[in-house]
């Protein structure tokens, strides 16, 4: 199965042709898409998309950019969204010290709240970590076996990746691995076992070369899979098989092949 574990089809950039794009994605051979929530509003929309399209699943959570605007009843709302059985994870949650669109104390507070929530409901997490590698790693370490999941658009070091593997986390990679200046990303992909790699697009962001700068969508997952297979020196069919299996295990997707 070819699985895009991180997409944002709720984004306004699809408002003019969302259904058309999603139908074309399905025709392209992408088997599953997980649409990631980033606020209460987008989490609700992600859940609705999962209900509407048979091959779309959802994650629900509050992105670090949104933590200053997060209402006190957020966890109650997330709990209600989990009644949709196609909600597969809590996320995306985490820390973003690059943009600092929300103050860092509110980011830390809601990261912990949502990690606690994930531990309580026993769902995997989707973690956003930008320029906060050390603190993100230390936070997930505190939960041990209680919470596992994926660091999406992984941008940390090889050493951090190995620590995450020891904790049972996976890492997802997208268009960045095709960029000429993405040496660290490619070094990580070379070093870590295929059993811990997931594929993503993070669309509409981060379209891969040669489409960099364009609006991204899951049809470009084929380009990403081919690049990662090249980096790993393995047949692309084998990479797709392994990453599909990884995604089903990570997100507890009960899907027949």
Image: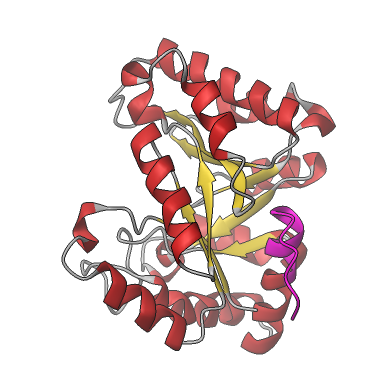
Q: Quadrant of the N terminus?
A: bottom right
Question: Does 21 sit left or right of 182 as displayed?
Answer: left
21 part of magenta stretch: no
In percent of width and height, residue 42 lies at: 36, 42
In percent of width and height, residue 221 lies at: 46, 75
Residue 65 sits in quarter: top left
At 48% from the left and 82% from the top, the residue drawn is 222
In percent of width and height, residue 50 lies at: 49, 58
From the viewer's side, name the closer residue of 245 and 120: 120
Question: Does 230 sit left or right of 37 as displayed?
Answer: right
Q: Is residue 2 visible?
A: yes
Q: Which of the colour schemes (rainbow, by chain, secondary structure, one colour) is used? A: secondary structure
Q: Is residue 137 above or below residue 242?
A: above
Question: Does 256 sit left or right of 38 as displayed?
Answer: right
Q: Quadrant of the C terminus?
A: bottom right
From the viewer's side, name the closer residue of 192 and 17: 17
In percent of width and height, residue 211 lies at: 27, 76
At 54% from the left and 71% from the top, the residue drawn is 55
At 76% from the left and 47% from the top, the residue drawn is 165
Q: Is residue 193 visible?
A: no
Q: Is residue 62 above or below residue 12?
A: above
255 part of magenta stretch: yes
Q: Which residues are magenta?
A: 245-257
Residue 86 sits in quarter: bottom right
The residue furthest left is 16
Give the total number of marks visible in the rendering.
Answer: 0
From the viewer's side, name the closer residue of 167 and 257: 257
Question: Does 190 sit left or right of 91 as displayed?
Answer: right
């Amino acid at each position: 199965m070819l699985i895009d574990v991180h997409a944002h089809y709720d984004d306004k950039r699809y408002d003019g042709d969302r259904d058309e794009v999603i139908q074309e994605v399905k025709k392209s051979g992408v088997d599953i898409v997980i649409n990631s929530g980033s606020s209460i509003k987008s989490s609700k929309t992600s859940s609705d998309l999962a209900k509407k399209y048979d091959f779309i699943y959802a994650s629900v959570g509050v992105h670090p950019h949104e933590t200053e605007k997060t209402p006190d009843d957020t966890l109650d709302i997330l709990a209600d969204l989990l009644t949709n059985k196609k909600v597969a994870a809590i996320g995306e949650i985490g820390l973003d010290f690059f943009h600092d669109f929300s103050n860092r104390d509110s980011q830390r507070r809601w990261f912990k709240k949502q990690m606690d929530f994930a531990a309580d409901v026993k769902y995997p997490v989707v973690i956003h970590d930008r320029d906060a590698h050390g603190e993100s790693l230390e936070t997930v370490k505190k939960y041990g076996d209680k919470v596992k999941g994926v660091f999406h658009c992984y941008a940390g070091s090889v050493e951090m990746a190995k620590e995450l593997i020891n904790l049972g986390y996976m890492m997802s990679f997208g268009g960045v691995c095709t960029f000429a200046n993405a040496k660290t990303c490619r070094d990580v992909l070379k070093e870590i076992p295929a059993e811990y790699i997931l594929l993503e697009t993070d669309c509409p962001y981060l379209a891969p070369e040669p489409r960099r700068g364009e609006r991204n969508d899951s049809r470009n997952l084929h380009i990403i899979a081919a690049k990662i297979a090249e980096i790993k020196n393995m047949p692309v069919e084998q990479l797709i098989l392994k990453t599909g299996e990884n995604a089903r295990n990570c997100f507890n997707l009960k899907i027949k092949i």
